């Protein structure tokens, strides 16, 4: 039976209000009812928060005693690549672009912007904010999932380094404990330094230094308040507040940071107002994934480093790499190629410049556009070298003591009956000169200057193709060469780097120095990991090398390479052109620098006709012009130096294959042709290698036009059916 007072009580408040009898009874009931309600339900309001607090701190105390600070894994760091003068030319990193710097190298503006935004009480709390933890825990309990972090800067650092981003109560407790212990172990500045070197600022940039370089191309020490506020704003959501892709959102977030900085007294309200009116400005070029000025060279350096140190160390180890590159010369090389081959349908080019005294690579161009074509033609394009390979036959002849003064007959075509030179079908090898022109009788020096095929075909039978292969290998050619007679005309494929290396051997008077592009490598903590050693081997006798240089000076003075002349500076070199004008070469040197240029198409053997006003590209046109323009800049501040004067004593003027010497040999009258013919041969040799040869014309032949002296071609190789 329900008590009447409880049953009647349900209706009494309404009646009491209308009866008007005293009212005191109604107040007494109401007061008693409230007291009864709170006595019955007070625990519902007090106990849950208390339980949360007790549970949190109880768990905290338990786990605190059993948790130690784990060893921090090494953070990935960006590798830096410098030129020979210490100028930064490239950075190498994988997905993490990080440069660790001390806090003193991070601007105060950025430090303050981050503290104002992420943890304004950073210097007051003990690693965690207990009120923030309780507030976050209550909200998480209400929503029955981990939603709020309540993270300090120290906790954010712990999350990134130790615990990860998984949202569980256990992880949050462990994060807080490690944060407290870190706060006891390190100073606040040390923790802030660790955080600012770790946090992600978007666009692949981890840490303040990488971010400053990525967005503005500056050091973190130079960040101003506006830049600092932009970076601090990115931390919360790097994709959302990306200043490159979302400048409006980045500006709004930046302005919020500026307000927070003003609230904390880091800047004035007036300063904040002025700065908020400014647009977001970033250096978009600095965000390029191809973070290198000289792609072909640095990609080659990267490959070499990976072979020695491994991918992980190169792209995450923070190496400091000093290379042999001269940035000014590299820019001159790239400009020379761009100036002479500006059209998108023009052929590409490769250029390699080597210091003959050491083997250091001073410049390397592997193509016209690294962003579009990654293949490095300087090291990867194996192409026929044409007449530029005659240099090795000439060097072999010097070793066989064949004199540059020896006289040879150069008919338009010649039947070589040497058994070593037979075509695959057993027929004789019958090479011919460019346009079937006759060179008449001339000295070996003149045959070199005017690149007479039929004379060098005879010469290779005299010295033997094996000897040519041997001397080429000793001088620096690493390609697998076949000892066939046609090797003298450049039928074997080589790369520009090898050709530059071999010609550098001549500049070094017969000493071969292995080419290299890395001087030294240091670790992120400045320990020396590698230092290059100059490797030198005698490849040719000095006098033999000097004689070859003397002959190659004639190529530039009066032969097929006059477009490469550098005024009164002594220059030696050799042109090269292959069948149907598919490859053009000029390889030359001064005593101080050897450079080789190749021009051609990468996609197959495509003839180079009508290129930038040049009817047919041969070695003496665009390749020689590129060589000239580069060397003119590279040698601008280098005093001219003459080549050594060789001796002719002991060299045979009447070797096998040569014609008997004659006081006045008569040249064969060339067949009339619309193309300029070979010049009248000279039986005499130019004055034997003076210290500074007779000055060449100060202005070389106009790029794209045939040389003003000598043949318009250089004895370009023409293959016939059945030829080897």
Image (cartoon, helix red, strand yellow):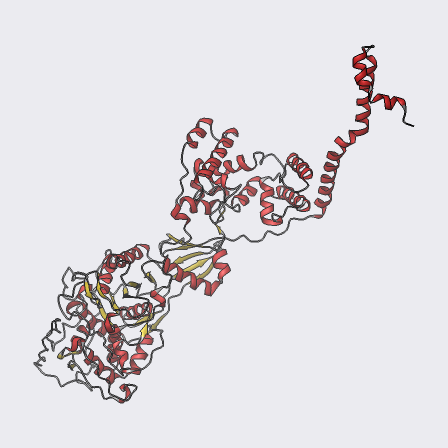
Q: Is residue 244 above or below residue 444?
A: above
Placement of the C terminus among the 4 image quadrants: bottom left
Which residue is painted at 44% across and 32% down in the image? 276
Which of these two is toward me, 445 or 592?
445
316 vs 642, left or right, is: right
Q: Is residue 339 above or below residue 714?
A: above
Specify whether residue 373 is in view.
Answer: yes
Q: Quadrant of residue 357?
A: bottom left
329 vs 610, left or right, is: right
Which of these two is toward me, 160 or 143?
143
**Position of residue 532 measured from the top left corner of the image (x, y, whole percent):** 41, 63
Placement of the N terminus among the 4 image quadrants: top right
Q: Quadrant of residue 613?
A: bottom left
Which residue is painted at 47% across and 53% down in the image? 78
406 vs 4, left or right, is: left
Which of these two is toward me, 59 or 357?
59
**Position of residue 434 measured from the top left corner of the image (x, y, whole percent):** 18, 75
Q: In which quarter of the image is residue 474?
A: bottom left
22 vs 708, left or right, is: right
Specify whether residue 643 is in view.
Answer: no
**Position of residue 27 measured from the top left corner of the image (x, y, whole percent):** 80, 15
**Position of residue 396 measured from the top left corner of the image (x, y, whole percent):** 26, 79
């Amino acid at each position: 039976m329900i008590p009447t007072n409880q049953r009647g009580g349900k209706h009494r408040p309404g009646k009491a209000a209308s009866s008007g009898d005293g009212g005191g009874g109604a107040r007494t009931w109401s007061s008693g009812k409230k007291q009864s309600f709170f006595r019955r339900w007070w625990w519902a309001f007090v106990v849950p928060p208390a339980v949360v607090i007790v549970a949190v701190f109880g768990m905290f105390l338990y786990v605190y005693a059993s948790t130690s600070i784990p060893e921090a894994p090494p953070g990935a760091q960006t590798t830096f690549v410098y030129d020979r003068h210490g100028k930064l030319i490239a950075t190498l990193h994988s997905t993490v672009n990080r440069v660790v710097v001390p806090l003193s190298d991070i601007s105060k503006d950025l430090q303050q912007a981050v503290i104002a935004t992420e943890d304004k009480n950073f210097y007051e709390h003990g690693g965690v904010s207990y009120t923030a933890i309780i507030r976050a825990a209550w909200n998480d309990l209400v929503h029955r999932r981990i939603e709020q972090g309540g993270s300090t800067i120290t906790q954010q650092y712990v999350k990134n380094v130790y615990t990860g981003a998984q949202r569980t109560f256990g992880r949050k407790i462990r994060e807080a404990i490690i944060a407290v212990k870190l706060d006891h172990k390190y100073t606040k500045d040390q923790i802030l330094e660790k955080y600012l070197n770790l946090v992600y600022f978007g666009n692949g940039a981890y840490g303040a230094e990488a971010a400053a370089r990525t967005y503005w191309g500056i050091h973190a020490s130079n960040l101003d308040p506006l830049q600092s506020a932009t970076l601090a704003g990115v931390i919360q959501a790097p994709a959302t507040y990306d200043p490159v892709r979302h400048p409006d959102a980045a500006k709004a977030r930046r302005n919020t940071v500026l307000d927070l900085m003003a609230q904390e007294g880091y800047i004035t309200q007036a300063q904040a107002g002025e700065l908020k009116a400014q647009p977001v400005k970033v250096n978009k070029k600095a965000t390029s994934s191809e973070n290198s000025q000289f792609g072909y060279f640095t990609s080659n350096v990267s490959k070499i480093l990976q072979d020695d140190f491994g991918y992980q160390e190169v792209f995450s180890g923070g190496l400091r790499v000093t290379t042999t590159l001269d940035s000014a010369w590299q820019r001159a090389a790239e400009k020379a190629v761009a100036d002479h081959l500006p059209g998108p349908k023009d052929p590409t080019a490769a250029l390699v410049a080597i210091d003959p005294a050491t083997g250091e690579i001073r410049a390397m161009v592997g193509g016209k556009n690294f962003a579009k074509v990654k293949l490095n033609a300087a090291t990867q394009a194996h192409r026929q070298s044409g007449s530029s390979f005659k240099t090795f036959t000439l060097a072999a002849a010097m070793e066989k003591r064949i004199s540059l003064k020896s006289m040879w007959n150069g008919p338009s075509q010649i039947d070589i009956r040497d058994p070593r030179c037979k075509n695959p079908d057993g027929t004789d090898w019958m090479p011919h000169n460019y346009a079937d022109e006759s060179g008449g009788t001339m000295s070996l020096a003149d045959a070199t200057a005017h690149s007479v095929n039929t004379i060098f075909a005879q010469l290779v039978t005299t010295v033997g193709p094996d000897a040519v292969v041997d001397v080429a290998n000793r001088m620096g050619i690493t390609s697998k060469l076949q000892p066939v007679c046609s090797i003298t005309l450049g039928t074997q494929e080589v790369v520009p780097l090898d050709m530059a290396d071999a010609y550098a051997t001549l500049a070094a008077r017969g000493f071969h120095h292995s080419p290299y592009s890395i001087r030294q490598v240091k670790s992120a903590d400045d320990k020396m990991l590698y230092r290059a050693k100059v490797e030198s081997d005698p490849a040719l006798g000095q006098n033999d090398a000097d004689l070859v240089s003397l002959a190659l000076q004639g190529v530039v003075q009066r032969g097929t390479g006059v477009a490469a002349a550098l005024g009164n500076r002594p220059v030696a070199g050799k042109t090269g052109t292959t069948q149907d004008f598919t490859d053009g070469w000029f390889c030359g040197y001064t005593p101080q620098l050897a450079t080789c240029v190749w021009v051609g198409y990468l996609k197959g053997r495509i003839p180079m006709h009508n290129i930038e006003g040049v009817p047919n590209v041969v070695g003496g046109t665009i390749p020689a012009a590129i060589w000239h323009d580069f060397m003119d800049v590279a040698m601008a501040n280098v005093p001219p130096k003459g080549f050594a004067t060789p001796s002719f004593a002991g060299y045979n003027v009447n070797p096998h294959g040569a014609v008997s010497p004659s006081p006045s040999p008569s040249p064969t009258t060339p067949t009339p042709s619309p193309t300029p013919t070979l010049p009248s041969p000279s039986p005499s040799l130019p004055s034997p290698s003076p210290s500074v040869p007779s000055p060449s014309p100060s202005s070389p032949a106009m790029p794209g036009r045939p040389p003003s002296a000598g043949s318009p071609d250089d004895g370009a190789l023409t293959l016939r059916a059945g030829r080897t």
